[in-house]
Image: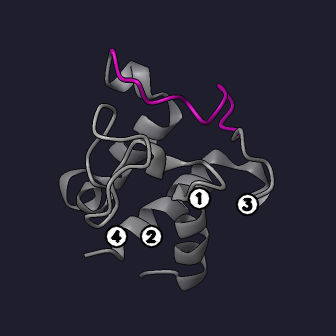
């Protein structure tokens, strides 16, 4: 069941003003802001390629799941996000919101 309120929060989270996923990830065919040298998978396809649990693991500790990745960690060891102003700084809830948004892109 999709949650429209989480979808909107997720859209904001991936944007350049919050977690900034669009710096390195293209989104629905729109190029990553940092340019082709750093461009990672289009977020539109992540929901089709990954299970939600694996996606959440990547968000929690990207370099542990994908050694050598340039993706920074947005959470500390307790799951607190670097962005405290959305969903009370709960990194897992923010990840769920991002998941809802990217799943709505298909």
Q: Which mark is residue 87?
A: 3
90 or 22, nearer to the observer:
22
Gap in Å between the C-alphas at discs 1 and 3?
A: 11 Å
Q: Determine contact: label 4, label 2, CB under 8 Å.
A: yes
Q: Mark 2 points at which residue?
A: 101
Start and end of the magenta stretch? Answer: 68-80
Residue found at x 60% / y 48%: 19
- Specify the quadrant of the image occupied by residue 1: bottom left
- How far apart in space, not on screen, are marks 4 and 2 (Cα)? 5 Å
Question: Who's the residue at 45% across and 69% down the image?
Answer: 100
Foreground residue, 50 or 30?
A: 30
What residue would you read off at disc 4? Answer: 103
Q: Earlier in the sequence, mark 3 or mark 2?
A: 3
| Distance in Å between CA atoms under marks 3 and 2 | 15 Å
Q: For the residue labelled by badge 4, is the local secondary structure a helix, a strand or a loop?
A: helix
Query: Is mark 2 in CB contact (under 8 Å) with mark 1?
Result: yes
* Residue mark closest to the camera, 1 vs 4: 1
Give whichever of discs 1 and 3 has the lower sequence position.
1
Tell me, yes or no, whether the two marked residues, 1 and 3, touch with CB atoms within 8 Å: no
Query: Could you say where residue 36 lies in the image, as x and y percent from the top left?
Result: 28, 39
């Amino acid at each position: 069941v999709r949650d429209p309120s989480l979808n909107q929060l997720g859209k904001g989270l991936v944007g350049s003003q919050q977690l900034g996923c669009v710096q390195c990830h293209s989104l629905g065919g729109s190029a990553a802001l940092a340019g082709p040298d750093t461009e990672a998978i289009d977020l539109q396809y992540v929901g089709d390629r990954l299970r939600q649990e694996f996606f959440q693991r990547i968000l929690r500790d990207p370099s542990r799941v994908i050694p050598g990745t340039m993706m920074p960690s947005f959470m500390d060891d307790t799951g607190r996000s670097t962005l405290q102003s959305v969903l009370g700084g709960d990194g897992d809830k923010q990840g769920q919101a991002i998941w809802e948004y990217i799943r709505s892109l298909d």
